[in-house]
Amino acid sequence: MGRPGWSPRALLVLALCTLLLWLALPATDLRAGDVAETTLRFANHLYSQEEYYRAIGEYKRYLFLAPEGGEAPFAALRIAECYAHGKRWSEALGAVEGFLGAYGSNPLAVQGRLLKARALVELGRGEEAREELRHLLDAHPGDPVAAEVWYLTAISLARESRWLEADEALRQIGSQSGRFVAAQGMRQVLAEAPAAKSKDPAVAGLLAAVLPGAGHLYCDRPGDGAIAFVFTGAFAWATVEAFQQDHQALGLGLGFIALSFYGGNIFSAVNVAHKYNDREERRLRLRLAPYEELSLEVDPGPAPSVRLTLSF
């Protein structure tokens, strides 16, 4: 008996099944690409609605679905920006360092390095931030990057009360830069910085020692100065009267009170001078706050580009 062979119908069915399987494979890849693209669009929507923490999850999902996708650098940087929006600067720094490690040669790396410097400033690591900015300026000496570098440098210096150095950094921003108007406004505020520390605690203490109440008057506290002058003077006069009338015990008691008021008047004047300076510096920083809004945004799309238009 001969060996059974394949019938023409069986061969046709096998060929059709093979063809359908072959067609299904690219369709599966296409569906995966569609899911990744939809995920990215949803992440961008959440970002535009300022739902930054939900957006982080969607950007991470996109990176999982399309780790080699064309928008992967954009998504990775957006994760860092979302953390920055939430003022979670340690996480922002970690995310942007991961981005730079993976996509250091991407055009968006400039954006990432600016964000890294900003995170370092917010974490109180100003010197590290300025070092990062110096390297960025060496690589990109022209606008708009240079203007953002100098502006962020000025902010980091102002945070450390290095007013003159901050002003010098702002002077480097040219009139053609989009940062020029803001830089000039910031310079006007910084011009008042020396006056913000105009009350010397040593001078206040010396004045209070010479004339009770004078130290408070020097610190623009006339009411406190009047109280210090009246009470210290009154008890000093009462002490003298008590001794002149031979009331030794009373004179000693009143003298102790007078000396207490006198010493307290000096201590209070010094303390008031410090408080005055701190209050004026807080006011100065409040006036500087609107100028500390930095633009660190990226354009989504097939060819993301640096576009410095978002504030943290």
Image (tube, rainbow, N blue to C red):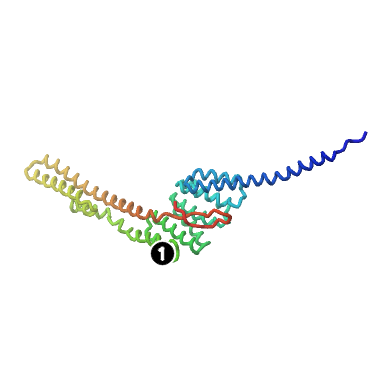
Which secondary structure, mark 1? Answer: helix
Residue 128 in view of the camera: no
Residue that sits furthest to the bottom in the current view: 175
Q: Residue at position x 35%, y 59% from top?
A: 189
Residue 12 spot, x, y in % from top left = 81, 41
For image coordinates 42% across by 66% down, the residue present is: 175
Give 225 or 191, whichever is nearer the viewer.
Answer: 191
**Residue lying at the far left of the rendered structure:** 245
Q: What's the amino acid at mark 1? A: Arg
- Residue in front for this viewpoint, 175 or 17: 17
Q: Quadrant of the N terminus?
A: top right
Read off the residue under disc 1.
Answer: 171
Q: Which is nearer the eye, 213 or 260?
A: 213
How crowded is the residue under tag 1: few (<14 C-alpha within 10 Å), some, or many (20+)?
A: some
Residue 186 occupies quadrant: bottom left
Res 302 quadrant in image: bottom right
Quarter occupied by residue 31: top right
Q: Does 297 sit left or right of 38 as displayed? A: left
- Labels in figure, total: 1
